[in-house]
Amino acid sequence: MTRAAATVFLVGAAAVGIGTAVWLSAAPARLSVEVGPPPKSGGSSAGTPDLVGVTGCLAAACHGSPGTDALAGTWGPATWQSSGTCWMAADPHRGAYALLEATQDTPRRRPDRPTAWEITELLGQKRADGKKLEAYEDVRCLACHTTPALAHPDVDRDTDDAVERARRQRMRGLRADGVGCEACHGAAKDWVVPHTAWKGRDGHAELFTKYGMTPLYDVGERATTCVGCHVGAPASPGVPVRDMNHDMIAAGHPALNFDFGEYHRRLPKHWYERARVGGHDNAGPGSEARRWLVGRVAHAEAACRLLADRAARPVTDERSPWPEFAEFNCATCHHHLRGEGPTARPGVRGQMVWQPVWPATGEFGPNPGVAQAPQLDKLRDLVRVMGTRNKFPGRGVVGEPALAAADQLRQERLTLVKAPAVEVTARAKNAFPKLDGKPTDWDPVGQVLLGLAALERDRDPGKPPKPGFDPAFDAVRGHRDWPAALKTLAPLLP
Ligand code: HEC
Ligand code: HEC
Ligand code: HEC
Ligand code: HEC
């Protein structure tokens, strides 16, 4: 079967063995928890969404000018005029909905990644009339593959109110835009007219808040926006939950191995990166290190909020199983049954280990940079709750520590966004582990490598990268050869 381990990033396509007995914990208790501030996702506070849609931003006099320069990698003060054109031409989010419309005959885009049709075939969900629930009808898939507010189930319901019916129809139509402008910039109805008159930087931050435009100039808010879909997020008013669980991964959906620094770099930029609002310099020295570290912290925060939300759901929700395997380090269960092969795990066999969001979750033992920071002690508590026993923690015991950890991580994110660049760079460098001789999980090692690459991009933008990155990527991602990986990583560590 082709949906196999190929989707397991870095864990490898090597034989998947389920080496762990799975103990279920005692009857889960219901826990009612508050799940933190709503994610930025283009929602509307009441009922069905009222979005402007991509075409609302694309007039030639607005963001629809020819985008030749930005597409060729030259940005400047006039880039905003072609932002929409660039998105249309090059952004991976544009096709996010179209993916869901795959049929039995649609070829795979990559041989190791099943189509949406294949994934939903394995998931086997049925509609009320007994027919297969297609991906483009499933709120679970729509929540991340369109502007999330458009996935609201009410959009698909009929109503007697003719005006509302027409609006819902229009909103269904907007799904075809994929992950549109408002998925990142916020629902535009209230700001689409006024924002054309915002000049200069003074008072910009207040205007963003007043009109509900997402403050993407703030690298922490930017990362939080992306992780809403690339990690997941609880439901918020008008926006359904965004949740990639093990059922969907086992049915062939790629596991979401996100790294904000790396994905941000890979996104074709439709903007001129600069200090748009006072106190936020996203282009100067140290900005790669800041994006990387802030991104890791925002990622861990999102994972904690999603975990708290999963733990608080009704036990009867069959699409939301508990324990949720995707919460755990994949190598806990998927590894060679014997020996020290590339997917062997050190430590106690059968012990659950929470998902690695290195350096926040502190793999590789004590290091002073992030994992040992006194201000993140709640995260360490959570990692212990999730991983000290040979059985799954019950729902009742994880909600509170997960929320406490999320709140600390949020504080840490706010601090890192404001800290001077030299301090953030020093903290980023401090985070790197002294890798010793033992083979270790490939997921956190891959995360180390992406962090190293971010620091390297900061080093001197004029200079060619240190030699050694290609062999390191090859050893870590290609061969999964631990001695070779150690040899290539050692000289790259700061
Ligand atoms: C939590 C958000 C989320 C949910 C829920 C979600 N997806 Fe995705 N999906 C993503 C992201 C993010 C990617 C891109 C992954 C990457 O490349 O890192 C993706 C990629 C894909 C791909 C592309 C694979 C390829 O060829 O590259 C398909 C197909 C897909 N999703 C289908 C689905 C289907 C079907 C569902 C519902 C069963 C679904 N998705 C639910 C976020 C989500
Ligand atoms: C995946 C998230 C995402 C999507 C989708 C998105 N943007 Fe952006 N956009 C950003 C980020 C991040 C920035 C940088 C913000 C900053 O520097 O303050 C940005 C900046 C901009 C800017 C400022 C450009 C400048 O140089 O001043 C404009 C205009 C813009 N986007 C328009 C659009 C339009 C129009 C669409 C839809 C066609 C869109 N964006 C879709 C993330 C997104
Ligand atoms: C509303 C959900 C959503 C948001 C918000 C979002 N993404 Fe995505 N992103 C997706 C989905 C779904 C895909 C997969 C699209 C596809 O494969 O066609 C994707 C794909 C990507 C890809 C291409 C991945 C690949 O494998 O080629 C990059 C890079 C990316 N996103 C970066 C970002 C960044 C950076 C942000 C924040 C500025 C962001 N995304 C915000 C849903 C989202
Ligand atoms: C608690 C143990 C456990 C954890 C942790 C776990 N899995 Fe699984 N996984 C399983 C089991 C058991 C199956 C077989 C389920 C079935 O066939 O119905 C499976 C099946 C799969 C499959 C389908 C394999 C096939 O050949 O069809 C994939 C892919 C997968 N898991 C990926 C992952 C990823 C990625 C992670 C980490 C995010 C992960 N798993 C974490 C236990 C686990």
Image: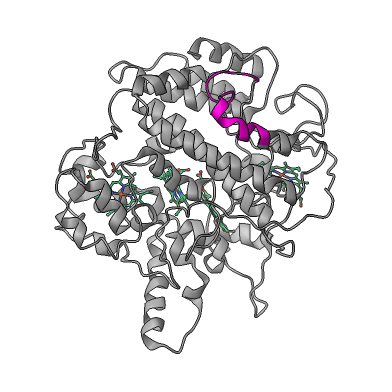
Count of marks, rendered view: 0
**Horizontal arrangement in the rendering, residue 123 relative to residue 489 (left or right):** right
Q: Which of 400 and 182 is in front in this view?
A: 400
The answer to which quarter of the image holds residue 424 is top left
Its colouring scheme is one colour
Residue 373 magenta: yes
Residue at 60% x, 42% y: name it: 404
* Residue 466, x across and y down, in percent: 41, 14
* Residue 84, x across and y down, in percent: 26, 53
Q: Which segment did they paint magenta?
A: 365-381
* Residue 452, x across and y down, in percent: 47, 21
Q: Is residue 255 above or below residue 129?
A: above
Res. 348 in view: yes
* Residue 227, x across and y down, in percent: 48, 45
Residue at 46% x, 29% y: name it: 293
The answer to which quarter of the image holds residue 8 is top right
Res. 256 in view: no
Q: In this view, does 119 lie above or below 412?
A: below
Q: Is residue 284 above or below residue 115?
A: above
Residue at 45% x, 89% y: name it: 160
Q: Nearer the viewer, residue 19 or 111?
A: 19
Q: Nearer the viewer, residue 303 or 55?
A: 303
